[in-house]
Image (cartoon, rainbow, N blue to C red):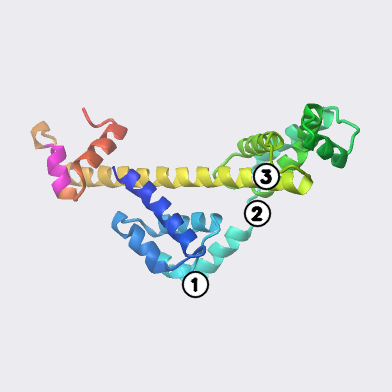
Amino acid sequence: MDIQKFQQKLTDVCELGEKNGKVLKPEQIKECFGELDLDKSQLIKILQYLKLKGISIEGAEAIAAAPQEETEATSEQEETKVPLTPEEEAYLKEYLEGLDEQAQGERGAEELFALLSQGDALAQAELSQKYLRSAAEMAVEMNCEEIFIADLIQEANISLLMALGEEEPAQKDETWLLGRIRAGIRNAIEEQTQRKFEDDYLVAKVEKLESAVRELTEDEDDENSKFSVEELAIILDMDEEEIRDVLRLTGDDK
């Protein structure tokens, strides 16, 4: 199915970017995704995903074929912090108030990190409580449209706990811990962003098929006039298995 091809090409282009020193040319993007017939908005999302992975594009506006004003607006939007929705604001307020009600240990972070390096389990538990607020604040700082803030905070907390349980490095400190939390949040955003790309691509395929079938059969009420999968594959220039997969999703495979 084409969604698998899209996943593979997204992986391939990321690997190519890594090999090229995290820089790609528009021609390389076009060559990789050209056969998938993506629209401009999908290409822009791919560029945004690559930027999130730290891969820059030479002349990125060319691949999107967007006017200069639109490109500048897009760049500015990417650099702007994504504000919380009213629902997210309410959740965050309640969450932080709950943290304030939790008892905090009296020992300082420096002392706790020293004990953590010695394998002190109590220090690990105390540090996890001490940095829950920092994890939440970092999630808010890195907030994105693809993930609800509650889920992003949960990812930050998981990264916090996993980092405190790591054996390396031998000497741990606040800078290291915050870096591990940030890396965990970024990884969660990347995974969700890729999943959304794949979902959007699949939806576009479904809509394309539905529109084409509707156009082909809009004046046909006779059951015998319906096209077979094989006929649709020829008419729409799509693989038979791809059409079957899409029809299964729409419930029209009966």
> Pointer 2: what residue?
81
Q: What amino acid type should be assigned to the residue bearing mark 3?
A: Arg
State if disc 3 and disc 1 touch (CB < 8 Å). Answer: no
**Residue at the location (81% across, 39% down)?**
113
Is the stretch drawn in magenta largely helix, strand or loop? helix
**Where residue 180 is drawn, which disc sits there?**
3
Q: In this view, does 186 lie to the left or right of 35?
A: right
The picture places residue 58, in percent across and down from the top left corner, at 48, 70
The crowd level at tag 1 (other Cα within 10 Å; few <14, some 14-19, many 20+) is few
Q: In this view, does 122 lie above or below 200?
A: above
Q: Distance between the residues labelled 2 and 1?
A: 22 Å
**Where residue 186 is drawn, which disc sits there?**
none
- Quarter of the picture containing the N terminus is top left
Q: In this view, does 168 lie to the left or right of 173?
A: left
Q: Which of marks 1 and 3 is in front?
A: 3
> Pointer 1: what residue?
68
